[in-house]
Image: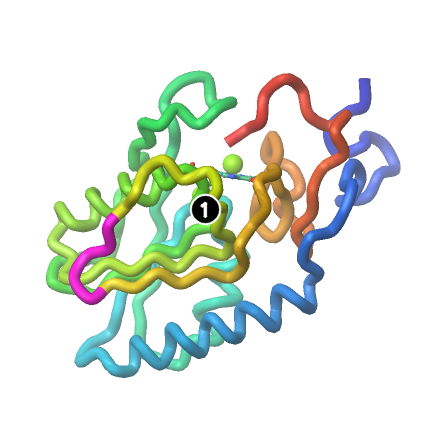
Amino acid sequence: AAMVGGGAGAGADAGIDRVLWTEAEIAARVSEVAAELGADLRALREPAVVVGVATGAFLFLADLVRRVDAPLAVDLVRAESYGDGTESSGRPRITSDLKVDVAGKHVVVVEDIVDTGNTVSCLIAYLEKKGASSISVCTFLDKPARRTANFQLVGDGKFYRGFECPDSFVVGYGMDYAELYRNLPYVGVLKAEMYKKDTSN
Ligand code: 5GP
Ligand code: MG
Ligand code: MG
């Protein structure tokens, strides 16, 4: 059986079947999203709080915020699913606490992918409980075909997305399979033989 990542002598792209979005395409789209988000955040009376969801959103978060021309704070949360960690359990929980006080603040959740919507629903509930006055969601990828949880934004919150993603498991640009491939500068689909029975969420 092939080793995930390809084993000795292999590069970061070992096991990638095809590229969905190149580094240049991603950079261009992230700039567009950042311009839209920046205009909205400049219209606010006070700095927003951008909350990235670790680990998957780390590259998108870094690329996005440096292109947003508006005052903002940055913080991170971690969201994990219960269960065996292979299939999304539908019951995610927040496992790391915010450092920034979001009470009365405009919050922008930055995600790698919104898939079923369970994680984002859980994050919205968590941030709402902490008193955020508005909650937006900015996701790099959106897989609307797989949505089962219809999350609701809070206050004047908006939904921003980079690309609509086909219904396949993707890696790269922060997103992993078994913690690998996050460092790819593009987004791709793995060769079928890289998967075991499960698809890791
Ligand atoms: P949810 O189903 O709760 O909307 O998505 C939960 C999380 O599963 C996403 O934030 C993302 O971290 C992960 N996920 C969903 N689809 C994919 C995918 O195609 N590739 C990878 N690497 N992670 C995914
Ligand atoms: Mg995520
Ligand atoms: Mg993951």
Residue 137 magenta: no
Identify which residue is drawn at 24% across, 50% down. 152
Please identify the quadrant where the N terminus is shown: top right
Which residue lies most toward the front here? Answer: 145
Q: Is residue 2 left or right of residue 102?
A: right
Name the amino acid type tagged 1: Pro
Q: Position of residue 122 (x, y in %)?
A: 27, 39
Snapshot quadrant of residue 115: top left
Are there few (<14), some (14-19), or many (20+) residues within 10 Å of tag 1?
Answer: some
- Quadrant assignment for ligand 2: top left
Identify which residue is drawn at 77% across, 25% down. 193
What residue span does the magenta drawing correspond to?
Answer: 152-156
Q: Which residue is mark 1?
A: 144
Q: Nearer the viewer, residue 100 or 178?
A: 178
Q: Nearer the viewer, residue 122 or 93?
A: 122
Beta carbon at label 1 within 8 Å of ligand 1:
no
Q: Position of residue 95 (x, y in %)?
A: 32, 35
Q: Position of residue 81 (x, y in %)?
A: 38, 28
Identify which residue is drawn at 51% across, 53% down. 141
Element class at badge 1: helix
Q: Is residue 6 left or right of residue 109?
A: right
Which secondary structure dominates the residues rendered in magenta?
Answer: loop
Identify which residue is drawn at 46% across, 38% down. 146
Snapshot quadrant of residue 27: bottom right
Q: Position of residue 31 (x, y in %)?
A: 53, 74
Q: Is residue 33 left or right of residue 133?
A: right
